[in-house]
Amino acid sequence: MVILLVTEERRGRLKRSAAELVTAARELGGDAVGLVLGADPGAAAEELAAYLPRVTALRGAFATAEAVAAAAADAARDLGADVVLFAADKLGLSASPRAAVRLGGALLDDVTAVSREGGAVRAKRFSYLSRVTETVEALASPVVVSVKTNALAPAGHAGARGTVEVREAPAPADPRKRVGERTAAQGARLPLEEARVVVAGGRGLGSAERFAAVVEPLAEALGAAVGATRAVVDAGWRPYAEQVGQTGKTVAPELYVALGISGAVQHLSGMNRAKVIVAVNKDADAPIFKVADYGIVGDVASVGPALLEAVKETTAG
Amino acid sequence: MKVLTVVRQVPDAEARVRAEGGRVDLTGVTFVMDGMDEYGVEEAIRLREAGHDLEIVAVAVGPARFADALRTALALGADRAVHVVTDEQLDPVTLAGVVAQVAREEGAELVLTGGKQADWDSSALGPALAEHLGWPHADWTTRLELAGGELRLRHDVDDGVEELTVTLPAVVTTQQGLNEPRYPTLPNIMKAKRKELATRDLAALGAPAPRVRVVSQEIQVRPRLNRMIDGEPEEAAREVARLLRTEAKVI
Ligand SMILES: Cc1cc2nc3c(=O)[nH]c(=O)nc-3n(C[C@H](O)[C@H](O)[C@H](O)COP(=O)(O)OP(=O)(O)OC[C@H]3O[C@@H](n4cnc5c(N)ncnc54)[C@H](O)[C@@H]3O)c2cc1C
């Protein structure tokens, strides 16, 4: 089985998700080859060579899903790849379906696990707003797989370093799609998807000021990222980049603290893989308590600050 | 210009989804038009209201119940609807091929669809459709303007927000923030009954072979402690912090 692992350079470095894709490749078994795309992919390719015997870097403009899909499909064809792996970040989710169509293959998207059953590639993924876990099997080849970020443990380095070949990307960017200005998500805070702890707030916080006064210090004390519900984002209290849920981000932290959040399914779908959930809500019947490990019925205005003090005491001791 | 909006009829988010014998069982579940697709229908109507000369065709590929989503789209303002009827569960890439066939036959120049569907939890339909058609696509769109055969868009990327210019024909996937979908009014619901809702047979469109098979489905259950901590705020908070440290070992 030949596996092509597709990743991009990000600010000159290898994306964190690349090591998770290596885990997927090892799960499947076979010969894995790395493809690193980017304007300056050399250093990232060297990083990837610590995991894989062979890495190709393509230097070029890969700002669009179209360009990434075309390069990945070409490489997969040249290699005779049976499986093509992408990270299921926004770019990967956008490029992988195009690559699957280009290759006439099957797409298993946003998966949390991969395996081989006999000759077939299988994967696990969520459906019905994350209420269902399903096992799917590819019926066509090659199999394009996008792997949910943070779902698999990052792989360790291989025993021997692989070879790296850097090439110029042949095709110029498609003039039908032009990328303009890019504005980075607000703040230099910890990226939500990578955070080990998330402190999230909902409409129960009452105002943007109260949200900032209660959620931010607690997040600070826990070394956590801040999350928000859609109701909070719609109200303009917090930026969309902080929204957790179906139309926001999916997180899988060790600890998720939900303050003044009702627990609507669209919100749960983004956070229900958290290992431990703490919920504070003044309504004892709030649905969030059904998914919580520890719940406090109370007003966030008093329980929030109390939690901050308690966390400080506990972690200091 | 012809605009297609692709819609799906999915379980209501609050519906209780059950699974039995390794399959999701949807009997008794209430279905609604996928909230994500509503943004696409709304945006097409707004383009027309902004003065663009458009025919809006709502398209659905799925079982008989999908006709309800099409009727809703007609009541909202779509001019006519096409329903490719099938009980087969097609994966997004295969289904995108069917929609592409309809788009070609219709001579559409813009296709709008939801960014992520609430039943199969996939965002692949839009990009796969664009590739089948050989068109560019923009996904996770939060702003859209049409001028001189070009779309100027804003959409979400991993580390923020990006501006895009896309030449038509193109596929756009829609999401929250793009607009606030309207509700169908009673007169418009009545008017929609006289609009054309054509049905097509999947076989007539080339009956594509599915590329993915669902082996099994189970309700995702993650055992939770559901432990409620009583007491005054300070007391309860201290107890939770202690449990997080000593029992859950996460702080
Ligand atoms: C297509 C679609 C996609 C969506 N995507 C998302 C998504 O990605 N993310 C998301 O979050 N939502 C999403 N939603 C919205 C979702 O359905 C809910 O409306 C939303 O999550 C509610 O946010 P909330 O819990 O902050 O607010 P509310 O539902 O208003 O709940 C506020 C809670 O705070 C409690 N409360 C009030 N005052 C206090 C107080 N003083 N102390 C303690 N508790 C208090 C209340 O008891 C209540 O439970 C989506 C909806 C649709 C239709």
Image: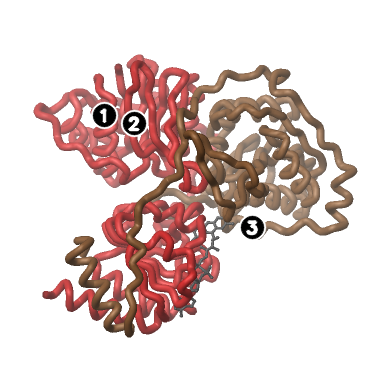
Chain colours: A red, B brown
Rendered position, A317 above or below A188: below
* Badge 2 or badge 1: first in the primary sequence: 1
Q: Is residue A189 left or right of residue A184?
A: left
Residue furthest left as drawn:
A159
- Residue type of the residue flagged with mark 1: Glu
Q: Which residue is mark 3?
A: B179
Asked if the residue at tag 1 contacts the one at tag 3, i.e. Cβ–Cβ closer than 8 Å, the answer is no
From the Cβ of disc 3, is ligand 1 less than 8 Å away? no
Q: Is residue A180 left or right of residue A166?
A: right
Tell me how far mark 3 sits from mark 1, CA to CA. Answer: 43 Å
Tell me how far mark 2 sits from mark 1, CA to CA. Answer: 7 Å
- Residue type of the residue flagged with mark 2: Val
Residue furthest front as drawn:
B21
> Residue A39 lies in what quarter of the image?
top left
From the Cβ of disc 1, is ligand 1 less than 8 Å away? no
Residue at image position (72%, 35%) is B64
Residue at image position (40%, 76%) is A297
What is the secondary structure assignment of the residue under circle 3?
Answer: loop
Identify the disc placed on residue A27: 1
Q: Position of residue A55 (x, y in %)?
A: 23, 26
Q: Which of the pair B79/B148 is nearer the observer?
A: B79
- Residue type of the residue flagged with mark 3: Asn
Q: Is residue A166 left or right of residue B153?
A: left
Q: Is residue B23 left or right of residue B241?
A: right
Mark 1 belongs to chain: A
Identify the disc placed on residue A114: 2
> Residue A54 lies in what quarter of the image?
top left
Tell me how far mark 2 sits from mark 3, CA to CA. Answer: 37 Å
Q: Position of residue B9 (x, y in %)?
A: 66, 43
Residue at image position (70%, 52%) is B42
